[in-house]
Image (cartoon, rainbow, N blue to C red):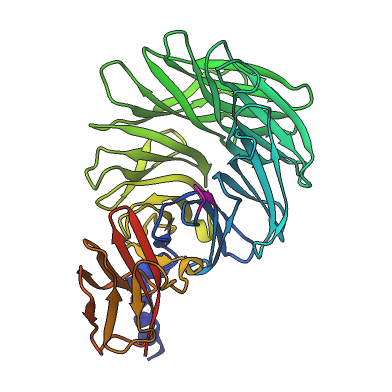
Amino acid sequence: MQFIRTLLLLIFFLQNFHYLRSQNSFNKVFGTYFTETGVNSVVLKDTSIMAFGTSSAQPYMSSQFYLVHVNQYGNLLWSKFYGASGVDQATRIIVDSDSTLILVGTVYDSLNTYDIKIIKIDTAGNVLFEKNYGTADWDFASNCIKLNDGTYAVCGKTYGNTVGLADAFVFGFKNNGDSLYFSTNGNAYNNYYYDLVQTTNDTLLLCGEWKDAAGFSQGIISKFSIGGNTFNSFIIHGASNYVCNSIDVNANGDYFVGVTYDSLTTAPDIMALVFSKSNYTVLLNNMTINGTNEEKCNEVRFINNTYQVSAYTTSYGLGNGDAAWFLFDLGGWFVTSRTFGTNEYNELFSMTSNFNNSILFTGVSTYSYGVEDLWLVNLDSLYNASATVSTQLDPNFIVEYDNSKEFKIYPSPFKDKIYIKSSAFNYDFTLMNLQGETILHCKNTNEISVSESISKGAYIFVITQNDKVFTGKLIKF
């Protein structure tokens, strides 16, 4: 009898093995009725996730930093906005310690110039300090990493050292906000750094693009000596445009580089290369991603002894651009890939290792409300994610509606009728639950019947009229 029970348990385990391994996968979007974009996420010590991005939801502001805190299953815990009126564009979130994080981005300040913005917060989202850095001209941050000594390095482009042309830069600062160095590099034209990685205690590796006299892009890899503030650069070029989008190092310290390239007659494709750390000799060049339309490399990372590429593609036909991920073995040979998307625009910009050998992606998806939302996809250890995208409305944006506006919505709470008083024409009314699911939709009506079978609780309404959007909360009893 004991043998039979053991055998039945074994059969059950084998039948449910995939489910047991896959239960930490998710596919979720977060946001408001306006535009949100995710740039990257970090996994905290308690297994929860902080996702960082940009939002245009707050009134009278072009954009703000947007921080979303979710648990390990992707369920929303809280969210916050950071920034004053103007333009704040997120670049990176980094874990500073068990109790603090660093937010990095670009801000359009009161002096009508773009600067690097650094905000230090605790794990509850409270601001500890915020500072702006840069030249007297425009400065844009592309990426930021934490170094072995606890300081930070930011790369990007600056217009502060030239007249009308951009230079690539690397900027260092301490975790208390004190700046350390600001060094530039480039030719006589436009130059950009997009990504960086630390190779030794005193050396950074950066990648980007140099423009030539004809306006074509040349891929660039630069070694930066932190103590000496000096650069040693190597150019990758071809018949037309080569852009080094992302860089990492493998277990041997060799350079793993993601390149987007095209010729005068073909759409952009992706090539992931491995260079020798000693002399830039190409060690692997068989990781190519070619499609019928456009491909763009967003990030490369060496994770779990594999080469991984996060990309944007228009070749798979899921929508107006899709997110794609490719996995290669140590020999550079293709292992597997995944494509994610809806029937609109989708893109995953960054990836990081999560618990239980899963991979966490952050980006943007046009899934709900017809606008872009911050998007999180977690692949389990079998490289699967939920095929169903779920939506979570931002609770900070669920507010009481001001009935002094041109639409008067009443009553709240309501039972089976909602009334709209307005002299306006050509408007749409949508009622949704807190998960973003549409309960009802109608046009140009003053009296709306609501089924009594709908559960009691809070609901969100959205009224759109031409380019105006009115949102608020209603309670059903």
Q: Nearer the viewer, residue 275 or 80?
A: 80
49 inside magenta stretch: no
Task: Judge from the rendering whether residue 254 lies leftward or rightward of residue 455; answer left or right.
Answer: right
Task: Judge from the rendering whether residue 414 lies leftward or rightward of residue 171; answer left or right.
Answer: left
Q: Quadrant of residue 355?
A: bottom right
Residue 98 against residue 245 in the figure, above or below: below
Dominant SS type (magenta): loop
Residue 170 against residue 353 in the figure, above or below: above
**Residue drawn at the location 26% of the way across and 85% of the way down:** 417
**Residue drawn at the location 27% of the way across and 49% of the way down:** 344
Q: Quadrant of residue 121?
A: bottom right
Rendered location of residue 155, percent (x, y): 62, 32
The part of the chain drawn in magenta is: 60-64
Rendered location of residue 378, percent (x, y): 44, 57
Quadrant location of the C terminus?
Answer: bottom left
Q: Answer yes or no: is residue 40 visible.
A: no
Q: Answer yes or no: is residue 382 visible.
A: yes
**Residue drawn at the location 63% of the way across and 36% of the way down:** 115
Rendered location of residue 449, percent (x, y): 22, 83
Quadrant location of the N terminus?
Answer: bottom left
Q: Nearer the viewer, residue 90 or 57?
A: 57
